[in-house]
Image (cartoon, rainbow, N blue to C red):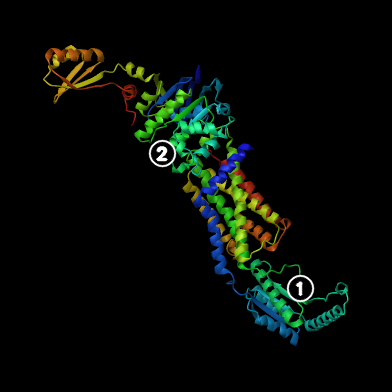
Amino acid sequence: MNTIEVKDLSKAYVDLKAVDNVSFEVAQGEIFGILGPNGAGKTTTLEMIEGLRRPDSGEIKIKTISVWPNPGATKELIGVQLQTTALFDYLTVREMLALFGSFYRRVLTAEKIDELLEAVSLVDKEKARVNELSGGQQQRLSIALALVNDPEVVFLDEPTTGLDPQARRSLWDVIRKINKEGKTIVLTTHYMEEAEILCGRVAIMDAGRIIDINAPKKLIEGLGAEVKISFQSSHGVALDDLEKQTEASETSVFEGQYVLYTKDVQTSIIGLFDMAKTDNFKVENLQISGANLEDVFLQYTGKGLRD
Amino acid sequence: MRQFYDLLAANFKMTVRNKQALFWLFVFPLILMGLFGIVFNGGQATPRLGIVDRDDTPESQKIIEGFEKAKIIKLYEVSELKDAKKRLKAGNLDGVVVLPAGFSKDLKQAIAENEERRARQMAGENPGSVESPSKVKVDLYYDPSATFVSQVVRGSVANVLGSVDRAVSRSPTLLGLKSHSVRLTNLRYIDFLVPGIIAMTLMNSAMFGLAGTIVSYRERGILRRLKVTPQPLALFLGAQITNQMLFSILRAMLLVGAAWAFFDVHVLGSYFALFVVIILGSLTFVTIAFSVASFSRNREISDTVSNIITMPMMFLGGVFFPVDTAPAWIRPVIKALPLTYLANALRDVMIKAEPLSAITYDLWVLVATTAVFFLISFKLWRWE
């Protein structure tokens, strides 16, 4: 069953089409990612679903309830983390959670607050003032705030932007944990590794349009992109021979570093080691690097994600 | 109701924990009051009093000697009332006392009556049945529009008359000022200052505390974050405003308490009237603050605009010094400032013991100002 249904959604600002005829569905229990560069329309799309911004046209349903024209109807169902960490400086972590809990019909008990603190690893910070928290801790708190009403679906708008790699990894763990507990999650990001690691499906968005939606792996496979295999050898290897044996489309060597490109990694690797056995050379420093979402994005839009 | 209480409690906590704001809203006005109170208390320019002796008897001379000995006023003997009035109008005198013709005769009679009364009292007659002696009247002229100065003059004259009275008649009740309807208080600068400081804090806490907070909430996305919850934002703002009122009352209590403890300042009017004026004044500046907050994109803008609004009021609204002697050309400006009416109303209640019915004009001006700025902020308000 689909938790979210978005159909023909559009929103324009003056002369800019921020969101241009966007449609997608998010299934119950999935982590759905919207990937795209800054200004692609990710946040605007999210804000229309959250009931913050009225769409020019199109329809949005959460759990079969239309968000517009009456966004109040779906507010009890959703939990939201906005791009800016909007927190009250002078409240403690626990007070912040209790206050936001009081905004909802569902009662937030002290035990439930303990669980939330546990889930976002802020148990030892419950008495700390919000302005004493690090960036990563504030981000984790704002995710916990998105969970105070035990929502059906959680929206995370660029949850890891501005965090150091370690804080980002710990946040990924938190997001996975929440998802395991059965929450549907919609997140935007402009980090492709984040989308690849977290998301079951990813919508690639650029200039207000959704270009493709699929599982990250399928998107990459769909590229038909070649895998790069590089290695060093104890003896010289004939490139013609190498190309034939590994069924590579292209081979090269530079300062003892052999590189070959192939669509079929398995055939190429078996071919390479057969050849090494027959010709009696040793394969060293073998590296295989596949295409990633960055390449997918590049393929579709002709530009990089972090422009 | 429960939700409102939770919001209010959270707001209260945040206000108490914001040390910087607490300093500006509580400690700073106290320091200001203390400094001004110490520096200017008693340092007030001595009122200049003209005296016209129409009786010209040894008794009236004694009264004049009494005035001369008093250090709280500076005495000028004037022969004609007409001249004295002219000098009063020119601002060369702050008040004129007239000892009427027949003054000594009346005084002698009063003393005689008093003696007789005392004798009867000694004889064991019920003192209640004895008519109290008629007071000997002394006329006082002053400019009623110069409220502050005239209060000082009236207070001084009453003081001096009291002491002369005691010396001449051995009874403190024989001499009286003719202007009996006027309350005779020895008004000091600190008495004038305390209501002014309270008015100022009502203004500043709204303009810098509330407006700045709302703008930074919007700037930092807190209003948007609240908007995705089912909680109506109006409830949030309502709690914010209630919190503001609560602290306005607490602050006024603190200031009044400190003024009482350190400077012996007393609230002469009713505390209920004071409460009403504080709530209304606070509301007036809350709506002005919301108007500023509604169009200010960030805190720098709202603080700048608030400065532009509060600066003229600080100096022309009658916080630190009386503005009723200001030159005519600036009076329209003074009359256009909401703080003028708030300071006036507070002062009338606190030091003149006026009931609410006597300050309806000030109150209506505040109500009208509140209504206008409520509409402005309602029209211009932006959540984002």
Expressed as whole percent of the image width and height from the top left, the position of residue A290 reads 28, 21
Across the whole image, how many numbered discs are drawn on residues? 2
Q: Is residue B374 visible?
A: yes
Front residue (pair A14, A203): A203
Is residue B337 visible from the viewing direction of this image? no
Provide the chain ID for the residue under circle 2: A
Could you tell me which chain the residue with mark 1 belongs to?
A: B
Tag 1 secondary structure: loop
Looking at the rendered structure, the kind of residue marked 1 is Lys
Q: Which of B261 and B53 is in front in this view?
A: B261
Residue A94 in the image: x percent, y percent?
Answer: 51, 38
The image quadrant of residue B382 is: top right
Towards the viewer: B171 or B302? B171
* Residue located 70% across and 60% down the image: B269
Neighbour tally class for label 1: few under 14, some 14-19, many 20 plus, Cα within 10 Å? some
Crowding near pointer 2: few (<14 within 10 Å), some, many (20+)? some
Q: Which amino acid does label 2 sit on?
A: Gly
Q: Quick one: which residue is furthest to the left in this view?
A: A236
Residue B298 position within the rendered picture, expressed as x and y whole percent measured from the top left: 48, 44
Snapshot quadrant of residue A196: top left
Q: How far apart are marks 1 and 2 (CA)?
A: 75 Å
The x and y percentages for residue B312 are 54, 58
Front: mark 1 or 2: 2
State the SS at label 2: helix
**Which quadrant is home to the N terminus of chain B?**
top right
Give the numbered dot on residue A73: none
Residue under pointer 2: A135
Q: Badge 1 is on which residue?
A: B178
Residue B120 drawn above or below residue A135 = below
Q: Are marks 1 and 2 in contact (CB under 8 Å)?
A: no
Residue depicted at 56% across the width and 69% down the height: B40
